[in-house]
Image: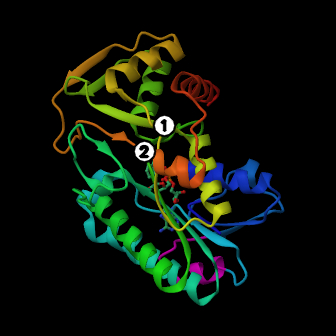
Amino acid sequence: MITGGSGFVGRAVVRAFVERGLPVTVVDSNPVPEPLRGELVTHVAGALGDASVREAAVAEGAAGIVHLAAITSVLRSVDRPAETYAANVALTQELLELARTRGIGRFVLASTNAVVGDIGRGTISEEVPLKPLTPYGATKAACEMLLSGYAGAYGLAASALRFTNVYGPGMARKDSFIPRLMRAAVSGEGVEIYGDGSQRRDFVHLDDVVRAILAAWDKQYAGTAIIGSGRSVSVLELVDAVRTATGRPLPVTHVPAKNGEMPAVIVDIARAQRELGYQPEVGLAEGLRGVWEDFRAA
Ligand SMILES: NC(=O)c1ccc[n+]([C@@H]2O[C@H](COP(=O)([O-])OP(=O)(O)OC[C@H]3O[C@@H](n4cnc5c(N)ncnc54)[C@H](O)[C@@H]3O)[C@@H](O)[C@H]2O)c1
């Protein structure tokens, strides 16, 4: 069962399970896009906050749950912390409980490196203490703790995978930095950069994220692992890489940095490599070319 299976990451995960010939139940308030509809995909339409939707989605005998549905916007979480708690934490608890009572053995959660907050220009590993600085990060940290409790007490193979910035085809409607750059490239406009653009970020390709989810699933992994490219780039380097991928000039304007803008997200992916056999395969230049093709087609 895949929550958020109609979303950006979810669509790619659903496709990967279907390609393995496995039946998938998608629970999402948005429709499943046409190419994914077929006899292997069942859609339970509705909000996960509705108990009847959850009951219908989590079938006895399901092999596992990949839980991707969440309030994913940091800004929205800051505006609406209580709603974010309900959507991210309370719902995860409800799903874990359904997994326990229905004998479902695996649970993969999409988490984030925002659980550790700002550690300056240091390298984020799973050993860094949790100190989220936003409701979004706090709810994901809370979810990780719930998973840990269910793994410890009931033997659930509960994996928390902390993705860095995910990019790839299918993000035309997203508001993150790469789609904004791509839209600017399409329209011939420029982009705003917060601060001097020296802040570093780790961009991980959607295909690598899907491989990590499948590895956690296959290994019935109980633990937490960071899933990134392992190579951070500055925002200015990213803009240059997008210029190369698109062949467009992409003029930039610098605007004051926003409060809470992290100076760096630099991650250590050694644990995922060791424990999941994870190895990022898509380089940034190649990945951006694919996103550009997708934007032009859209
Ligand atoms: N995209 C990233 O860069 C990134 C990075 C780190 C972590 N994550 C996490 O990965 C997961 C997937 O992210 P995404 O980028 O695919 O997000 P997305 O917004 O594209 O997809 C989320 C999907 O979940 C559905 N959904 C959300 N709440 C729901 C609810 N209560 N009931 C029913 N459906 C609901 C939405 O309709 C949407 O289709 C999220 O948990 C997010 O926090 C994403």
Relative to 16, residue 69 above or below: below
Per the image, label 2 sits on a secondary structure element best described as: loop
Instruction: Depth check: give the residue in front, 96 or 42.
Output: 96
Q: Which residue sits at x=47%, y=80%?
A: 152
Question: Mark 1: which amino acid?
Answer: Ser
**How far across and down, in percent of the image, does residue 295 sit?**
57, 28
Residue for badge 2: 164
Image disc number at residue 39: none
- At horizontal 24% and vertical 41% (from top left) the residue drawn is 262
Mark-to-mark CA distance, 1 and 2: 8 Å
Quarter of the image with the C terminus in it: top right
Q: Helix, strand or loop at disc 1?
A: loop
Depth check: 139 or 83 in front?
139
Looking at the picture, does residue 80 appear above or below residue 151?
above
Residue 159 % position (x, y): 52, 65
Residue in the image at 27% along x and 61% along y:
130
For residue 139, what is the image quadrant? bottom left
Give the magenta part as a residue range.
45-58
Give how far across and how far down residue 77 sits, in percent: 29, 59
